[in-house]
Image: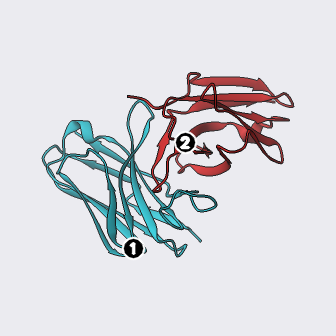
Chain colours: A cyan, B red
């Protein structure tokens, strides 16, 4: 029973296209995140939502737009894809956004490998 | 500006010996530190954490040490097992759920 799931697992597309990655968690968590892992293996936070509201918005191009239809879902839509968007994108969730123990453990999805040609 | 650094990209250890993974940070506002373990084609999974008010936290074979004055933490795994072979990320938090991750150390435990 997958706790945090992402679809698709692999996504290959052409420059300029628009694509979406979906994320769902069945842990009953209030907070969800999107991370990007680039070729240098850094895991960088992009966005965080708590109860469907945006609470963290790092310096990310406007082409990236997260959407949270409900607490259990946080989707990532990317417009006008560029070569530099190629990376592995991880969705994660946590019980609350406080960052204070014991709730700052995050549960990650398996990742979506995006390749832009 | 890389606030969390793992200077060793890889580490190879013999089964049964101790593995020591290191992490340095620059932001003195960080007050909670976590280690995550990642297998290929999977997302990171939480391993162990430590609050800045402590200098050691132990969970079975895993112990995390924190040296605040040096802004350094380390993860000790003893005894190391082949199943421990994975990428280990340290992460630091200054609240509001925002964790800053290092770039990982690949641990290989040889049988």
Q: Is disc 2 on the same chain as disc 1?
A: no
Task: Give the left or right position of residue A38, taking residue A4 as reference.
Answer: left
Q: From mark 1 to mark 2, how far is it between C-alphas?
A: 24 Å
Task: Give the left or right position of residue B68, taking residue A80 as reference.
Answer: right
Residue displayed at 68% across by 45% down:
B53
Residue displayed at 26% across by 44% down:
A59
Secondary structure of the residue carrying numbered label 1: loop
Give the camera-side residue of B2 and B82.
B2
Residue displayed at 53% across by 51% down:
B43
Q: Are marks 1 and 2 in contact (CB under 8 Å)?
A: no
How many marks can you see?
2
Q: Using the rendered view, name the quadrant where residue B88 is placed.
A: top right
Secondary structure of the residue carrying numbered label 2: strand
Q: Using the rendered view, name the quadrant where residue B33 is placed.
A: top right
Provide residue B85's location: percent of width, then percent of height: 69, 36
Q: Which mark is residue A51?
A: 1
Which residue in the structure is indicated by mark 2?
A: B91
Q: Quadrant of the N terminus of chain B?
A: top left
Q: Residues within 10 Å of mark 2 (few under 14, many from 20)?
A: many
């Amino acid at each position: 029973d997958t706790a945090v799931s992402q679809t698709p697992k692999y996504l290959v597309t052409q420059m300029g296209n628009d694509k979406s990655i979906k994320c769902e968690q069945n842990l009953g968590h209030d907070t969800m995140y999107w991370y990007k892992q680039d070729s240098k293996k850094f895991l960088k936070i992009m966005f965080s939502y708590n109860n469907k509201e945006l609470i963290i918005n790092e310096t990310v191009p406007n082409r990236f737009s997260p959407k949270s239809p409900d607490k259990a879902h946080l989707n990532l839509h990317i417009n006008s894809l560029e070569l530099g968007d190629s990376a592995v994108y991880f969705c994660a969730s946590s019980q609350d956004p406080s960052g204070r123990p014991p709730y700052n453990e995050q549960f990650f999805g398996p990742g979506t490998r995006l390749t832009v040609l | 500006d890389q606030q969390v650094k793992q200077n060793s990209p890889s580490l190879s250890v013999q089964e049964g010996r101790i593995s020591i993974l290191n992490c340095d940070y620059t932001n003195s506002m960080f007050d909670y530190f976590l280690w995550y373990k990642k297998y290929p084609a999977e997302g990171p999974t939480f391993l162990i954490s430590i609050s800045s008010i402590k200098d050691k936290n132990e969970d079975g074979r895993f112990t995390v040490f924190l040296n605040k004055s040096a802004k350094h933490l380390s993860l000790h795994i003893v005894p190391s097992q082949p199943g421990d072979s994975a990428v280990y990320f340290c992460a630091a938090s200054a609240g509001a759920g925002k964790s800053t991750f290092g770039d990982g150390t690949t641990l290989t435990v040889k049988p």
